[in-house]
Amino acid sequence: MTSSKPNQDQTQEPNQDQTQGPNQDQNQDAKEEVKAEEKEEKKEEKREKKEDKKEANEAKREQKKEKQDSWKDFIYNPRTGEFLGRTAGSWGLILLFYLIFYGFLGGMFSLTMWVMLQTLDENVPRHQDRVASPGLVIRPHAVEITFNRSDPENYKHYIRQLHDLLQSYNDSIQEPVKKVCQFKRSTLRQCSGLPDPSFGFKEGNPVIGLKPEGDPYINCTAKRATSLQMQYFPSEGRLDKMFFPNNLSLCSQPDYVQPLVAVKLLFTKEDYNIEQTVECKVEGSNLRNDDERDKFLGRVTFRVKVSE
C-alpha cells in the first residue's frame, strides 16, 4: 500500500506537462495573428489616406477646370452659341430696344431745342439786364493824365490808346454798316486823330474820348473857380438818336460800334503845371448821375496836368 502512491504522482506529472505544451503554442499563434492583423489594418489605413489625398487633389483639379470652363463658356459657349450669356437673338432684341429708346430721347431733345429756338430773336436777347442809368467810359484809360507837351515820348502811350479806340471807327470800316447805325471817325473832326495824329497832346490841348452807354449826351465841367474852355465832337456832346434805334436788330452787325463823344480841353499857358480836375456826366431825362454812394454811376472824374 505504501509503495503505490509515489507511482501515482509520477504518472500525473508527465500528463500535466503534456497538456501545457499545446496551450502555449496556441497562445503564441494567436498573438502572431493579432500582430499580423494590426499590420494589415495599418497598411489599409495608409492606403485609405493616400486614396483620400488623391481624391482631394483630383477634386481640386476638377474645380479649377470647371472654373476655367465656366469663364470660357461665359465668354462664348460653343454648345449653346451664347456670347456673354446671351444668344445672337437676345443680343439683337436688346440692341433694338436701346436703339429705339435712345432714338426717342434724341428726338424729344431735338424737338424741345427747336421749340425753344423759335422763341428767340437772333439779334435781340430775350432777357436783358440793361440798367436805367448808363455808365461812362474814358480813353485814355487813366484817372490821372500827366504829360510834358514838348516830349512826344511822354504822351506816346496816350495817343496809342486813342488810335486803338478809333481804329474800328474808320470810315472804310463803317461804310458797309447800315446808315442808321454808322458812326464814322470823321464825325469827330479835329478830335478824330486824322488831321492831328497827336490828338492835341502836342499843343497841350489833349483830347479825351467818352463812350456813353445808352442814348444820353455828355457834359463836362472843371472843378475850379473859373470855367475851362472845351470843344465837343459831335457838337455839344449830343448824339443823334439814330445811333440808338428802338429795334436793336438794325445794329446787330459785326462792324457796329457804339457812338462816342470827344472832348478837347483848351488849356492856356496859365493852366500849365497845375492839376486840373474834370468831371463828365451823362445828362438826359431820368438818368442818375449824382448818387454819392456810387461815384461812377453816370459820371467819371479824371485829373489832367500839362507841363511845358
Image (cartoon, rainbow, N blue to C red):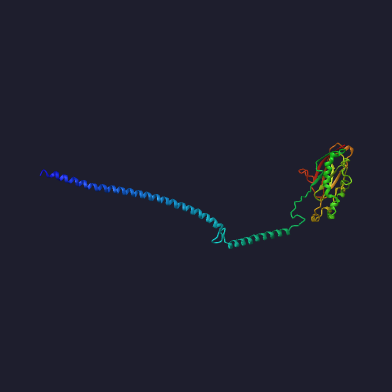
Residue 172 can be seen, yes or no? yes
Of residues 33 and 137, the one drawn nearer to the viewer in this rendering: 33
* Residue 52, x across and y down, in percent: 43, 51
**Which residue sits at x=14%, y=45%?**
7
Residue 81: x and y, percent?
56, 61
* Residue under the image location 69 percent in, 59 percent down: 110
Which quadrant would the C terminus be assigned to in this image?
A: top right
Percent of width and height locating residue 264: 87, 44
Q: How many labels does the image show?
A: 0
Residue nearest the observer in this picture, 128 or 80 = 80
- Residue that protrudes farthest toward the left in the picture: 1
Residue 240, visible in the rendered structure? no
Q: From the viewer's perspective, is residue 91 above or below residue 208?
A: below
Left or right side of 228 for 81: left
Q: Is the N terminus in the top left, top right, bottom left or bottom right quadrant?
A: top left
* For residue 170, above or below residue 204: below
| Identity of the residue drawn at 63% across and 61% down | 99
Q: Is residue 80 left or right of residue 45?
A: right
Res 80 → quadrant: bottom right
